Image (cartoon, grey):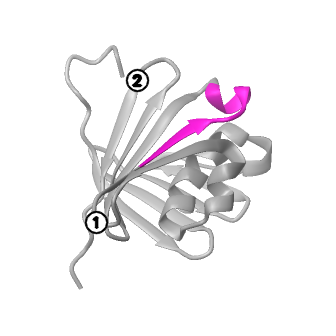
Amino acid sequence: MAALAKPLEAQGRLIYARPGHLEKVTESPSLERLVADGDRAWLQTENRTEMVFLPEHPELRALIDAIRGTLGGNLAALEKFYSIDLTGSLEDWRLTLKPKGERVAKYIREITVEGQDAEPRRIETIEADGDTSRMTITPISQ
């Protein structure tokens, strides 16, 4: 956030299961869990849980579907909310998503996903107010 003197760093896990299950678990500095499955999303903190019906909140759905669509290779989900620009090569690529509709653009200016081969490695979200969020994805060795 622009008001912070230095970036706020968080660590956690990102879990995706086809066709539409996404979990973003923040483990530090505080516990938070976002679970999106189909048309519903739950946000859990240490003190509360809130459920959201995603069709009623297209701005949140657009953000979640940017991640789900990229991880699942679902071009139709991405095209629903974004203009898409793909550059680079198969080994080193960049996907730039710009909101199509005003309702989503009110919250998100641009999302950039960078990857290597079939693996997204970094997701940067620039919000409409200029705040930036960067997520680095490190695959877990199996």
- The quarter of the picture where the N terminus appears is top left
Residue 3: in sight, yes or no? yes
Q: Which residues are magenta?
A: 95-105
State the residue at coordinates (73%, 59%).
39
Residue placed under numbered mark 1 in the picture:
91
Q: Residues within 10 Å of mark 2 (few under 14, many from 20)?
A: few
**Residue 105: x and y, percent?**
63, 27
In the depicted structure, whether residue 61 falls above or below residue 89: above
Q: Is residue 118 above or below residue 36?
A: below
The C terminus - image quarter: bottom left
In the drawing, does residue 108 fall left or right of residue 29?
right
Residue 96 belongs to the span the image colors magenta: yes
The numbered dot on residue 130 is none
Where residue 38 appears, as percent x and y from the top left, is 70, 65
Q: CA distance from mark 2 to mark 1?
A: 29 Å
Q: Which residue, given by chain and number where applicable, does mark 2 sit on?
A: 131
User: Label 1 sits on what residue type?
Assistant: Glu
